[in-house]
Image (tube, helix red, strand yellow):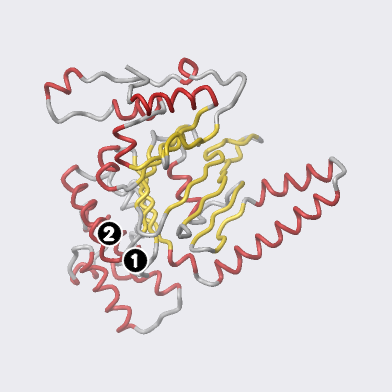
Amino acid sequence: MEPLLQVKNLKHYFRLKGMDLKAVDDISFDVAKGEVLGLVGESGCGKTTTGRAIIRLYDITGGDVIFNGQRIGVGVREKKREIAAARKAGNTALAAELARNLVQAKSEVEDAVHGGIMSKMQMIFQDPIASLNPRMTVREIIAEGLTIRGIKDKKFVEEKVRAALDMVGLVPEHAERYPHEFSGGQRQRIGIARAVLLEPDMIIADEPVSALDVSIQAQVINLLNDLRERMGLTILFIAHDLSVVKYFSDRIAVMYFGKIVELASAKDLFENPLHPYTRALLSAIPQPNPITEKSRKRIHYVPALVHDYREEMPTLREITPGHFVMCNTQEFEQYRISMKQHTPLIS
């Protein structure tokens, strides 16, 4: 079965003072239909940039993004560099082939986007107040997607808005109010209603609960879980709170400095974390029991102390079926032995 979303060698570099800042550096993953993939890591690791690049808020530097079998993103800048390098090397045949491939890829992206496929992928933003226009009513905010698509039937729009409000636990009277009149949790529900109005196949949820109180976080997570089951949604869930991600996700990808360092099922990742950075993240989760919390030991990840990549750089390798870790050959063997013996690599 073909995945709903395929991300292949995705790169997104920000240009700063003539240099490339590698926010996302050559990551690949798939998301199956109906699956929730959690994307976790510390602030600045590239999680949000990944989500925004997938949904085309950023023009990607390199790689490909394929959604529902159609290419929706192509790294034009990197492909142009490859063409220029081939010409410089005097390989005109390769340069011509790369140029043809780029034209074909750009044409596929344009056809897919103009065909309306992007309406089937929606985003929930981290800051609910910053993502809502303060000059628009809730009705206008939620119905904006229909307006952009040229739907002018007021009765139809009204019915869709009411249905979306009901779906996220708000009442029809809320439609006439403005964003500043709501609490943070209610604003996030408005953002969710806007995202589900067009009945998408996939939602990219960019830390949708990080700005909310703990009790409200649970309500929003439960709402997303309910919508997932009711609408058959596929979700890329971006977060830094591993305890939330464990509850909500089927699989989890751990990012560090723009790269995915570990990818596994939620159960496997928590029971058998292999990469030192994953172990460091898990050790930072507070324990509800004051006795165990008092004895909890933090693991500090210092790459220079735990990795030796002078002779061989790491790549993402499959240690056991479905469990991938960024490692070189030496580490790969260590991880395989650790999994067989079920012994911790870090005490």
Tell me where residue 336 sits by quadrant: top left
Q: Residue at x 35, y 42 (%)?
A: 265
What amino acid type should be assigned to the residue bearing mark 1? Ile
Count neighbours of disc 2 (C-alpha within 10 A) and say few if under 14, some if 14 to 19, many if 20 or more: many
Q: How far across and down, in percent of the image, does residue 187 sit?
A: 26, 56
Tell me where residue 112 sits by quadrant: bottom right
Determine the secondary structure under disc 2: helix
Question: Mark 2 and mark 1: span between their CA atoms?
Answer: 9 Å
Return the mark for residue 179.
Answer: 2
Residue 263 as seen in the image, left or right of residue 225: right
Determine the secondary structure under disc 1: helix
Return the mark for residue 272.
Answer: none
Considering depth in this image, is 47 or 246 the residue closer to the camera? 246
Of labels 2 and 1, earlier in sequence is 1
Q: Residue at x 30, y 84 (%)?
A: 155
Residue contact at pointers 2 and 1, CB within 8 angstroms: yes
Label 1 belongs to which residue?
A: 141
